[in-house]
Amino acid sequence: MEKRKILVVDDESRMRKLVKDFLQRENFEVLEAGDGSEALDIFFSQKDIALILLDVMMPKMDGWQVCKEIRSYSKVPIIMLTARGDEKDELQGFDLGVDEYISKPFSPRILVARVEAILRRTLEGAGSEQVLEAGGIRLDKTAHMVQVDGQDVELSYKEFELLSYFLENKGIALSREKILNNVWNYDYFGDARTIDTHVKKLRSKLGEKGDLIKTIWGMGYKFEA
């Protein structure tokens, strides 16, 4: 079986080595980059990278810039590694399409478990239905396009993933925790502003169709078409 490639991007060589050692024990092939510019060079030259572990604070080009550049071309899973635990940073990461957000210091074993979980979900999702339609909304996963009553609607990466999840589970009451764990692959403990902020933005972009996303007070949301 061919080894899956993980790109580890961090300006601290000791951190890269620590993560690399643990990933290699689980039979991953690990590529390293010491700054954002080098990371982009490697990513676009390799083409078959399965997942990226990306530090936020780096010289030349920070993790946000790298993530934004990659997301304009690819939906490869990205885990952000950062010493900053501010909620605004997390929301910014999710808006850019980050799949998971892990603050330093972290357990390397937990990190490897998160990597494996995200890759497993990615493989499971590859076989799912690619075009979803309900209530005048059409979402094409392959083309990464959304139309409302035939008109194109521009969504951020996470808004697109959130709408996909609602369409796949229409008529089902979804708790905030369940939405976060499935859309962000993120074990979230704390308030619900992350999910509420994204739902508010998504409703606004869907116009009148935003009313199809119903609030279930004290629990979460339900898409009803």
Image: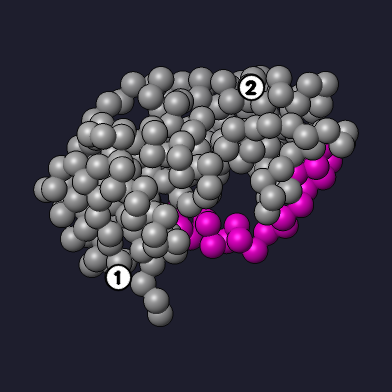
Relative horizontal placement of residue 113, taking residue 198 as reference (left or right): left
* Viewer can see residue 103: no
Frontmost residue, 146 versus 46: 46
Task: Identify which amino acid the numbered label 1 is placed on.
Answer: Asn
- The residue shown at (24%, 55%) is 32
Residue 31 percent location from the top left of the image? 28, 59
Q: Which residues are magenta?
A: 117-139
Q: CA distance from mark 2 to mark 1?
A: 40 Å
Residue 3 percent location from the top left of the image? 36, 72
Q: Which residue is mark 1?
A: 27
| Classed neighbour count for the residue bearing mark 2: other residues with Cα under 10 Å, few (<14), some (14–19), many (≥20) | some
- The residue shown at (74%, 32%) is 153
Residue 122 percent location from the top left of the image? 53, 57
Frontmost residue, 186 versus 38: 38
The residue positioned farthest toward the bottom in the image shown: 1
Relative horizontal placement of residue 14, taking residue 76 as reference (left or right): left
Say which element carries label 2.
helix
| Classed neighbour count for the residue bearing mark 1: other residues with Cα under 10 Å, few (<14), some (14–19), many (≥20) | few
Q: What numbered label is drawn on residue 201? A: 2
- The residue shown at (30%, 25%) is 85
The residue positioned farthest toward the left in the image shown: 14
Task: Identify which amino acid the numbered label 2 is placed on.
Answer: Lys
